[in-house]
Amino acid sequence: MDRIWLKRYPVGVPADIDVDRYASIAALFDETCQRHRDRPAFTNMGTTLSYARLDALSRSFAAWLQHESGLAPGDRIALMMPNILQYPVALFGALRAGMVVVNTNPLYTARELEHQLGDSGAEAIVVLENFAHVLAQVLPKIPLQRVLVTGIGDLLGLPRGPIVNFALRHVRKQVPPWRIPAAIRFNTALEAGRKLTLDAVDIRPTDPAFLQYTGGTTGIAKGAILSHRNIVANLLQAGEWIRPTVSSLPATSVPIVITALPLYHIFSLTANCFMFTHLGAHNILITNPRDFHGFVATLRKYPFFFISGVNTLFNALLHTPGFAELDFSSLRISLGGGMAVQAVVAARWKEVTGCILTQAWGLTETSPAACINPVDLDFNGSIGLPISSTEISIRNDEGGELGIGEVGEICVRGPQVTSGYWHRPDETARIFFRDWLRTGDIGHIDAQGFVYIEDRKKDMILVSGFNVYPNEVESVAAEFPGVLEVAAVAAPDEDSGESVALFVVKKDPALDAQALLAYCRRNLTGYKVPKHIYFREELPKTNVGKILRRELRDELRSQA
């Protein structure tokens, strides 16, 4: 397909980026720290690291990895932490030493952790002590060479750091007992590395930078291989997309970025961490975004320029007391991804903040950004335009390309696309039509180049042979007064094969199922109308707040 979307590009956004501008993330980071040395880089719990300090600390950790850890370039190191200052220090240190980062969800169960560490072949791990007891359970089965443990307060300085650690360990009891005899403290490694020299490492653009594990919603989690070139390309692509907005700021202004999604998630990792670090922004790390009252209190302190999140996070903020009274005069970009942004949430967000909620789309396998809407374009329901150096093609099951407006599988080609899955050639072969990545998302592209998702292929509901896309049903139901959150899934049905089941969290306790059904009947074709409505106190979600339809679907199937 011709790149018809280029005509709708924002002014100043190039059709292509120079993918060879930086040989590695480490080279880009070195330049960034020199250019922005005196600027604040990351803030967490009242403590700020400047770019100069981040440079020094990550250099110390990289030197320790080189000379004291027993690891070599190309070895895998797992990072098992929420959004705390130790994460960017360990991240950039590992990459500067030529290691491959395995981002690890700190909420993993022992079974999940054992699979990821074993599958990746991780030789080392940096873990927050709050989760060290889970790691201790799997260590007898996983031959890790090095375990580094840190406490939340370890980089917060005096007197805040020791106070925070004491409170979490002994007052709140949030650090379960653990015993790992060979473990060393992260700060001990930093202190040792401060006395060592970081030797130059030959990192090639095609070398793996990350094994980024998929959520495993369709089976066992797989590690997508993301090279230095993949990540550098994607941060440059996304950076060029928002550069006109950033350039409108005064030259001395430092954009403030709110990072609530965990940095170990690919969306936040590339957009908030890499892209905005390259632009010299000031990142505010939210360690526990589920504490929405504390979240709003933090937002009150900073005139933030950018915030990213998933639909459920934006919706929850809108329903948190005090949020609507914040000062949004500096907010220029609100970026939604990870799941479909609902029109009712986007409309309410703009009404409250005065800022458009811009929808973007991508996958772990695309590092992640593939499409983004212009940030000054009102919400239109699309996932945006293919970004610089990116092509989108709509294909049928045989791999044939479909035309404008025709519905099929969305396929992607570009420098940010993974080469495949770690040690899984069979799975890698399944996701490619030659050099086109099959995304598993069903959608179409319009005459202007905007891409629209109907739904995930695996989530589609088949009612008497008719395709029903959960996103459409959810969007309609979410507009009904009294609905807070909603998920539509397939329920087994003797007559139609499958029917639509709707799981709802109430905003209004008086919400009536029959009234909601009547509203759906007025706004949906008959076969799309939910046959069952189930009210819940909450819906199952991933660590970033994405609703897990699979769990709800499996529950209905087990009951059937």
Image (spheres, grey):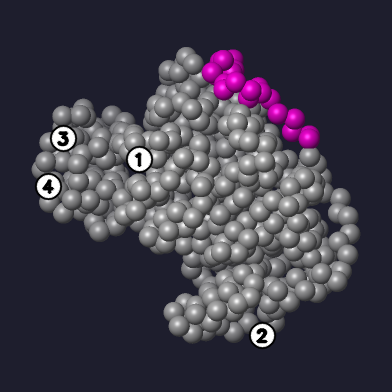
Across and down, in percent, residue 58 comes to 74, 61
**Residue holding disc 1:** 352
Give the structural element (helix, strand or loop) at label 4: loop
Q: Which mark is residue 512?
A: 4
Across and down, in percent, residue 220 comes to 51, 55
Residue 11 placement, left or right of 518: right
What whole-number distance in Å separates the C-alpha atoms at marks 4 and 3? 11 Å
First of labels 4, 1 by sequence position: 1
* Circles 3 and 1 in contact, beta carbons < 8 Å: no
Can you tell which of label 3 and label 1 is closer to the viewer? Answer: 1
Can you tell which of label 4 and label 1 is closer to the viewer? Answer: 1
Of residues 45 and 277, the one drawn nearer to the viewer in this rendering: 45
What whole-number distance in Å separates the C-alpha atoms at marks 3 and 1? 26 Å
Give the structural element (helix, strand or loop) at label 2: loop
First of labels 4, 2 by sequence position: 2
In the depicted structure, whether residue 316 falls above or below residue 138: above
**Residue holding disc 3:** 519
Q: Amino acid at mark 2?
A: Pro
Q: Which residues are magenta?
A: 1-21
